[in-house]
Amino acid sequence: MFNENNPILKVKNISKVYAEDKNNIVNALNDVNFEIIKGEAFGLVGESGCGKSTLAQIIMNLIPADKGEILYTKDKTEINILSLKGKKMKALRKEIQFIFQDPYSSINPRKKIGWLIKEPLIIHKIGADDAQREKMVDEMLCSVGLDKNYKNRFPSELSGGQRQRVAIAIALILNPEFVICDEAVSALDVSVQAQILNLLRDMQKKMGLTYLFISHNLNVVSYISDRIAVMYLGEIVETGNSEIIFKNPLHPYTKALFSASVNIEDVMLKGEPPSKSTLIKGCVFASRCGYCSEKCLAEKPVLKETADGRKIACHLYNEH
Ligand code: SF4
């Protein structure tokens, strides 16, 4: 369906350590690698605090990485986003947009909807004049399922689902290529979630968008994603075709997640997670894994491809 030789984004060897204070460091991301193919929806799943949102912020160049590159392909040329500053980064922000979990905290509650959607056009000097920009706002409102009269309303006058439609309109008005949806439907009721997911899918088809879809809700990720990556404590443990992994998860962590619940936060794992301030020598999941061996404690498993095309970081599957 997608051309694997046409990645739009490569996350290469990204590591990030936070210093909470001088005695306490947090290993947020450890050598994270994956590629997102142009036109696909790529789901990133994991528990709260596993590093998903930190990675999203690094991809947007909002916080620096300690190591690694984020390579974005534009006009067949790879650009390392992390090396961009000033005007070059501003220009790229037109192409890479963000949809947050809580639209109310990401939009100015004192501005009317029409102004909020038009503002990115003004900032990026798009549209010949104000009349043309107003027309673009009307068309975008229509595309996200809102009447143009919503332009004159304030965010507080909208329901949660309507506000998320506005957040989508703000993200898409610049006609981006790549959209990061960070828990974009998590704050909504289940019925509204389905409507917003369908809207995101429709807009993906209509505009040829590529999504990085970050969520802890497995139903949501399975519905929207073509491929997924499962993250545990800042490391990718399994990645590949979404349908294959959801039908037959192989990594012990993925198995535990998918067997128990649609909500990752409800999953009960044995043992305790290791301290995030300790650099783990062996497998990151060892303290919670029923299959843990001496090798798992001594040697970190790397992501290796299996016969069905997925990649797993686990010694159980790395023998051959
Ligand atoms: Fe479990 Fe070992 Fe596989 Fe880690 S490498 S998930 S500890 S079997």
Image (cartoon, grey):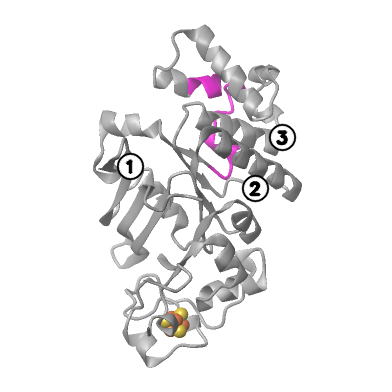
Q: Are marks 2 and 3 in contact (CB under 8 Å)?
A: no
Q: Is residue 242 above or below residue 40?
A: below
| Mark found first going from the N terminus, 3 or 1 | 1
Q: Which residues are magenta?
A: 100-119
Q: Any atom of ligand 1 within 8 Å of the CB at mark 1?
A: no
Q: Which mark is residue 159?
A: 3
How far is the residue under mark 2 from the one under mark 3? 12 Å
**Furthest residue toward bottom:** 294
The image position of residue 8, as x and y in percent, is: 38, 45
The image position of residue 252, as x and y in percent, is: 52, 78
Mark 3 lies on a secondary structure that is loop
Residue position marked by numbered label 1 in the rendering: 73
Mark 2 lies on a secondary structure that is loop
Q: Quick one: 6 or 313, which is closer to the camera?
A: 6
Residue position marked by numbered label 2 in the rendering: 187
Picture quarter with the C terminus = bottom left
Q: Is residue 301 above or below residue 18?
A: below
Q: Is residue 120 above or below residue 14?
A: above
Residue name at image x 42 percent, y 17 percent: 126
